[in-house]
Image (tube, rainbow, N blue to C red):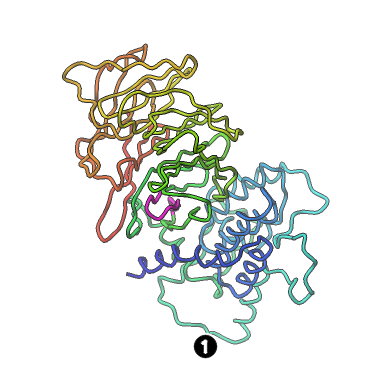
Amino acid sequence: MTSTILLVLALAAPVQSADCKEWRECQKMALEAAERQDYNAFHDLSWRALQTGPKNDPSLMLMLARAQSLSGRPHDALVMLQRLVAMGVATDVEANDDFRFVRALPAWADFEAKLKGLPPPDKPVPTTPSTTAPAPAPSTAAKPADAPAAAKRKSARRGSKEEPSKPEPLKPEPPKPETPKPETPKEEPSTAEPPKAADARSASAARTGPLVFSAPGLTAVGLGYDAVSGRFIVGDRKDRRLLVVGERSGRLASLAGVDAGFDEVSAFEIDAAEGDLWVTSASSQSRTSTLHKLQLISGRVLTSIALPAAEGPSRFTDVAVTPQNILVLDAEGRRLYRVAKKGRALDLLAHIAVPDCTSIAPAQEGIAYASYDRGIIRVDLTTRALTVVEAAADVDLAGLRWVRWHRGSLVAIQGGAGGPFRLLRVRLDDAGRRVRAVDVLDGNVTLAGPTSAAVTGNVVYYLSPAADDQVEVRKLTLK
């Protein structure tokens, strides 16, 4: 019951942070939350400041990393710090007490080695981010990083009687590095440590089974896995938003929503090479569609490309990433569009003269495959030629809801809108024009949504409903 309440609070927190509109205001409110040790609010307000502030601002990124560490998200903090190192930004993370939980991670040793390679800057980026606004008075310019240490000293002066009583499980010692350096003194547990942070670390350490999280009312669309940050991304069609859940922490939070300009979310895909997230949304009332480009780590909207009204009614149902372009499938107009990764206009690539187009999967060497109600279409992205993929009479390719390319085959979900579903691997011949065989990977899959799956490496991840409004991330290894 307690874990459910915490997850609900995690969902609600981003809505509260939306009270700030301008990034300096969000930054100020975030630092105030840090001073009063409200670390969850500190985290959400820091996210908002990063989303609305200057792109890739080191001070805002570092503030978020600090908030992630203090709120029990050390793995997320390490990812953000890695991005700062990639930018050549030096900080005080090796000595700052707010990052002690990050330094306790097994991966810290490798990261610390990268820090040694940075040239010493004339003036390192401070943990408390600077702004272009007038400098605050000295009383408000005190380093929030000193808040936990100050709280510890204050607690020592007052004595333990004024500390709230906590059950023993809520006061674990901070995790220790697997290979601690002899010269590094061991830290004593801080009485000012937020209970929720301790809970998150304990849950992360204890997680050995499938990832299960609470998501009441979720109308799942799509699934993405960001291996860099260890997060899963889930679309919620009805509530017009994207959610993220930590692979280790199990925390669920909002990444982007109506404020990003979404209509009903219909599909999304991660561009790992560029660090972007491409999202399609469609309005069933106006019968219009939009392609959105977001920053993957923060959910900040970079570009929104609406299909012009002159193109007629549309309903974008899938989006796919190629090395140079983004492909967008329009089911209502039976069209395939293309846009350059840095482009701002959709180019009509081909008319797909088959009904109920559902999904698009780029393959190799300028070829893509589109699923429709009775089978698969092969699309030559260079010549724009379309060919129906042939299959034997006993091969059933009807009702393919979702397809993705994997090493000469198509991984597919087959079934009606309400399920049950089958998870298939459609093996193609060397020319990619004929089905050689169909392997049933799982003949009875229960999905949270017909397209709530992703292929990452040799693993298929998919969302399956569990008991009590919970959702489980399951995986299947492709051999």
Q: Element at badge 1?
A: helix
User: Can you tell which quarter of the image residue 192 is in?
Assistant: bottom right
Q: Residue furthest top?
A: 431
Q: Say if 384 sits above or below 10 in the image.
A: above
Q: Circle 1 is placed at which residue position?
A: 161
**Residue 75 located left or right of residue 21:** left
Instruction: Identify the residue shown where x is 55% and y is 44%.
Output: 294
Q: Give the range drawn in magenta.
A: 235-248
Residue 426 is situated, as x and y percent measured from the top left of the image, at: 29, 24
In the depicted view, which residue is nearer to us: 56 or 217? 217
What amino acid does circle 1 point to? Answer: Lys
Instruction: Identify the residue shown where x is 55% and y is 67%.
Output: 41
Q: Say if 241 sits above or below 20 in the image.
A: above
Characterize the local packing of mark 1: few (<14), some (14-19) or many (20 or more) Cα atoms within 10 angstroms. few
247 drawn magenta: yes
**Residue 164 located left or right of residue 402:** right
In the depicted view, which residue is nearer to us: 441 or 314? 314
Instruction: Identify the residue shown where x is 40% and y is 65%.
Output: 8
Instruction: Identify the residue shown where x is 31% and y is 23%.
Output: 376
Q: Residue furthest front?
A: 310
User: Can you tell which quarter of the image residue 389 is in?
Assistant: top left
